[in-house]
Amino acid sequence: MASGVYRTGVLMTPQGSDIVFYRDGKTATVSVVKLKLLNVVQMNIRTNGKSDAGLNVGSSGGGVVDEPTMILAGVLPLALNPGARTAANIGFGSGLTTHTLLGWPGLVQVDTIEIEPWMIEGARHFGDRVHRAFTDPRSRIHIDDAKTFFSSYRKQYDIIVSEPSNPWVSGVAGLFSEEFYRQVREHLTPGGVFCQWVQLYETNTDLIASVLKAVSANFSDYVLYAPNETDLLILAGNKSLPRPNARVLSASEIAESLRWIGIVSIQDLEIHRVGDKKILEGFFKTFRIRANSDYYPVLDHNAEKARFLGTDARHLIGFTLYPLPIMDMLGATAPPEEKTNVSMTAFFGPAKTANMAMALRDFFLSGGASGRPLPADYEQYAFRVARMLRNCGERPGEEEGIADFYMVASLMSAYLKPGEIDAVWKAMEAMPCGRALTQRQRTWFTLFQAVGRRDPAAMKRTAKALLLQEPNIPQGPMRYLVASAMLGSIALGDPEGSLQIWNGYRTKLYGTGEPSLIFRLLAAECSPRHRKLIW
């Protein structure tokens, strides 16, 4: 019964796991399972066989995949509202989010609402990892339904976190509805921050759009963060949301929780940012699904189907992986740092990719050596580009040289700051053959310089020139050129020009198929009145 065979098809065995807690409650059967793994001592708490939270309860090894979600669900609202005094957390789970919130000394009370009493008792088995949830005098645990709790207590909070179970679980989808968000909004202080967890697995982009439409209808601003590659955190408020405040890193207990998941700086926190309402609202409007509502429960009716079909919406994180600074140039306020310095983490692809860009930067600035590891394929790209720029007599073919340069330059242009990427271009041009490139290679070099500098006019001009010069280039580089030209046009305030580029190349790029989400985003930015015509 604790295995959740109905969901995974896998039966746990005594050789691989221990059942340390098992109780049949009024609303669910709760179990705590210790998994016998090689690297960490992992324990998870389950409702009806479905894991709701997993923690590494050992003394080493770092966090497991659920932990960035639970820790950041507490840290991010604090970072956006460091003056918060009160917080409410919907759904106890392992207790880690409540524990994390209580690591902030400014909070005077944290109310945690959990409908199933045995969930609280099961979470005690996580011990020191969640001890503040049970021992801190500021922690108050309420056994109640979330909607009933807020209706009864009629109290306002500076922070409200909602971490219910997955929407396909019976009765849960109502905590992702327009009506619930309206209720939550009324219980936030004027500058309060609401944090909603939703999974990207066992769902689809339409269902995520239905949740975001419900959030958008009730909050003046929201921002999305991806703590890992399977979850999404929606931060919403009644006022414009600021960038995370670095003060959150100054509290020793918060800093300790963040270090456990590989976050030691504000850049480490910001690499998890996906986008905000200003940029994404138009994109989500292109999905025809309506906002999830208690009266039109599109999430409740479709979540089970998505789970059985095994679909997901993980490609939403692709906004942060595409090799163009799309969010920066569409209006997001870029952080002030002059140099990219992101810690490596096992949980999040964009952090790994940023580290690759940093390694390539160091490689070219140091003349061929980097203290950061590079994947073997990118190391070869970098060596071949360096050889092309140093040894004029050993140049590869023009096509091969452009392909290698495209791989390294597109990555650096997207992730490095304008000042540091300019230093890389200057180092490349200073190499013996740096100014002896062919005209075609020089044009590509100019494009990557423009992208690195966030120069929309040069991006548009150079990308359009390359599209005319190279009508038969491979699909990957062609999509990059079309996206660069569209992004440059939008950033210049020329959405009609961007739409013209899209209409000219859409069929060539995708035929009659569905375009990628990047082009859906760029096309949606062309003009609101065109959205219904584009899709």
Image: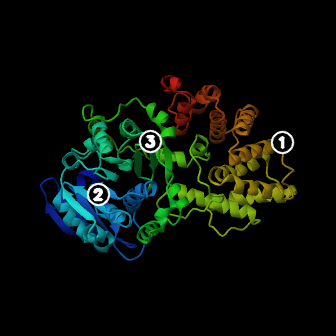
Left or right side of 372 for 431: right
Position of residue 388 relative to residue 330, above or below, is below
Residue 5: x %, y % from top left: 24, 55
| Label number found at residue 52 | 2
Left or right side of 227 for 354: right
Residue 236: x %, y % from top left: 40, 46
**Is label 1 in a helix, a strand or a loop?**
helix
Separation of disc 3 and disc 2 at Cα? Answer: 28 Å
Color style of the picture = rainbow
| Label number found at residue 220 | none
**Is label 3 in a helix, a strand or a loop?**
strand
* Residue placed under numbered mark 1 in the picture: 439
| Label number found at residue 221 | 3
Position of residue 222 relative to residue 37, above or below, is above
Name the residue type under label 1: Gln
* Relative depth, front residue between 347 and 119: 119
Query: Residue 427: which quarter of the image?
Result: bottom right
